[in-house]
Image (cartoon, rainbow, N blue to C red):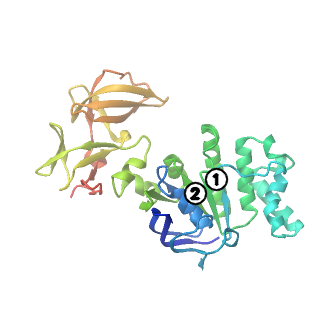
Amino acid sequence: MAEVRLSGVNKFYGAQQALHDVTLDIADGEFAVFVGPSGCGKSTLLRSIAGLEAISGGTISIGGRDVSTLAPSDRDVAMVFQSYALYPHMTVQENMEFGMKVNKVPQTERHARVAEASRILQLDPYLDRKPGQLSGGQRQRVAIGRAIVKEPKAFLFDEPLSNLDAKLRVQMRVELEALHRDLKATMIYVTHDQVEAMTMADKIVVLNAGRIEQVGTPMDLYHRPANIFVAGFIGAPAMNFLDVTLTNNTAAHGDEPLGPAPDGTVHLGIRPEHITLSPAGQGQMAASVLLRETLGGDAYLYVRTRAGAQMVVRAEGDTALDHGAEVGLDLPAARLHYFAADGRSLGAIA
């Protein structure tokens, strides 16, 4: 396996710039996840690493070798696609062997590699079946097995779980994490689902409009977002934001004071799980419940503050609060995030 390094990578489609001076280091054996909204450039960046997109500037190196102008077949990477991309007329065994056959790997070695990948992915009972006889999860495992047998320096995954149902996505996330531990491989994974990013990644790369907004561990991004975009993207449900005014370094939302804030604060952020509910007439803020979503152990209350902002609050699943209920909200100072007018995080209270 090997490290992947990008330096000043740009990509243009005509006059439109899709990637802006992307510089990034992914360590040997690291599981890095590119995440961001649709159209942010994450798949373009992955395809550029794979060689499926020619970059317009900058360099890409894999294992210390500059691969910026090399064909995909010469980069020593394996890519797993959302669509599986299996040959329907071939068996699982034949699909997994095909790339090695083209590269003239001896038959005994081909069989040995397929046997090992099949053992890891629990595909032994399906080796003689064709893709049409498999479930979506089994087909995705075959696609991953086909990547494993190449013994690449890096694995690239382009939204591989998005075609699966919710339960199967969770199962496959666990399987991919176990695979990463077993192979100790460099893996780069693209998703629009920040839950996948939070649960799987050693390192998350948050992209927006072709630029890297922040790079860090999942909990770094959760606790210390660099800006309001990252704060709003990482976490489910998303962080709540309040417009505030600042007087003598005290923030207020409408006519309700919320406590000290750093100079320059224009927005406060707090996650739904960090808000404390109080009876009506108590707490820092008054709010009314618009909607309750019950998820079993948890419930999410959609509320409107007295000043007109909408927020989400996590509550106990058996809460009796529902539409029309009046509540108080407490926003613990230690859980607040402070943002300037340009969206930059202002960190903690000085």
Q: In which quarter of the image is the N terminus?
A: bottom right
**Dot 1 amino acid type:** Leu
Q: Earlier in the sequence, mark 2 or mark 1?
A: 1
Work out whether 56 lies above or below 81: below
x%, y% of residue 149?
76, 62
- Horizontal side of 140 relative to 129 (left or right) equals left
What crowding class fits label 1: few (fewer than 14 Cα within 10 Å), some (14-19), or many (20 or more)?
some
**Dot 2 amino acid type:** Tyr
- Horizontal side of 252 relative to 206 (left or right) equals left
Give the residue displayed 20% in from the left and 44% down from the top: 244
Q: Looking at this rendering, what residue extends furthest in the front direction? A: 14
Q: Quadrant of the C terminus?
A: bottom left
Q: How much space separates mark 2 and mark 1, taking CA atoms?
A: 10 Å
Work out whether 169 lies above or below 49: above
- Tag shown at residue 189: 2
Q: Looking at this rendering, what residue extends furthest in the right direction? A: 108
Q: Is disc 2 in contact with disc 1, using a CB cutoff of under 8 Å?
A: yes
x%, y% of residue 208?
43, 56
Give the residue displayed 70% in from the left and 44% down from the top: 137
Image quadrant assignment for residue 219: bottom left
- Tag shown at residue 71: none
Image quadrant assignment for residue 253: top left
Question: Which residue has dot 1 on it?
Answer: 176
Question: Which of the two marks, 2 or 1, is nearer to us in this view?
Answer: 2
Q: Tell me the element at label 1.
A: helix
Q: Tell me the element at label 2.
A: strand
x%, y% of residue 157?
62, 56
